[in-house]
Image (cartoon, grey):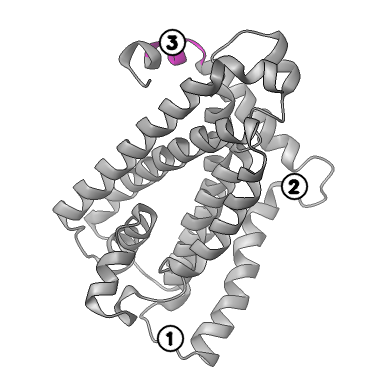
Amino acid sequence: MLTLSRVNELAKYRELIIKLAWSDFKLRYKNSALGFFWSLFEPLMMLIVLYIVFSNLMRIQVEYYQLFLLLGIILWNFLDRGTTMSIYGIIGKPSLVQKVYFPRDILIISSCITALMMTMLEFVVFLIFMAIFKIIPTILVIYAPIFILIEFLLILGLALGLSALNVFFRDVQFIWRLILQVGFFATPILYPITIFPENLQKLVMLNPIAGIISMMRGCLLYGIMPPPTYLIYVTISTLIILFIGYGIFDHYEPKFAEAI
């Protein structure tokens, strides 16, 4: 379980965690002509296609829709990459898992940090767009790091559970891919939540990632204070998912080396 002693133990391996994360980050773009710039081009290309479809063909009318859409894509990509990379964190490194002792959750944490690094590069593009549209953030910008931290913990909780289950049930990786594809359209990324009836809005916003995206947009683009009760709900939901993820991971961890 995630306890204070567990956190202290992980702190002792912080250099290894950063080294693994940085190694995965560099390896992702090895022998690539554009290298790290792919992290910038991917969300831009996706933005262009989706913007054309939803702003012109489907007539979505939202203030600063380009930024509205780009921010949603960046935050969703963080969730997508973090969980997808981490789901192979154990089965993708059998030599480490079988021959070397260290807390196995380090592999998952490092994958999530790699995804965070890529997301920070994408935020460079977002900041450039904000400058182009002459949007000056209000004091509410101080909430941005908080939302990033909450999403990181949400991703970590999901990643821990999924990576452990995937060692024993390989269908998990395919099921999760399907869930992500459906979730992209079920989450208010391409459209404002207000297009739904009020009762359906409440149902959609039970999803923590929907809340993170919505509150981040409000703070950065529209100067809207995040509702305190909803921020508390998203935070508590995220922590519950994190503890459940650690519980699943701890349950299966002793059998990893044998199963791989």
Q: Which residues are magenta?
A: 8-13
Q: Amino acid at mark 3?
A: Glu
The stretch drawn in magenta includes residue 104 = no
Instruction: Please state, as top left, top right, bottom left or bottom right, where the N terminus lies in the image.
Output: top left
Counting from the top left corner in percent of width and height, residue 232 is at: 20, 46
Between residue 78 and residue 165, name the one nearer to us: 165
Numbered label attached to residue 9:
3
Numbered label attached to residue 44:
none
Horizontal relation, residue 146 to residue 247: left or right: left
Counting from the top left corner in percent of width and height, residue 49 is at: 62, 77
User: At x 55% / y 19%, what residue is drawn?
Assistant: 253
Q: Amino acid at mark 1?
A: Ile
Q: Is residue 32 above or below residue 257?
A: below
Horizontal relation, residue 125 to residue 1: left or right: right
Q: Are dots 2 and 3 in contact, CB under 8 Å? A: no
Q: Earlier in the sequence, mark 1 or mark 3?
A: 3
Q: CA distance from mark 2 to mark 3?
A: 34 Å
- Visible in this render: residue 150? yes
Tell me the residue that label 1 is attached to.
Answer: 60
User: At x 33% / y 61%, what residue is drawn?
Assistant: 220
Tell me the residue that label 2 is attached to.
Answer: 35
Task: Give the secondary structure at mark 3.
Answer: helix
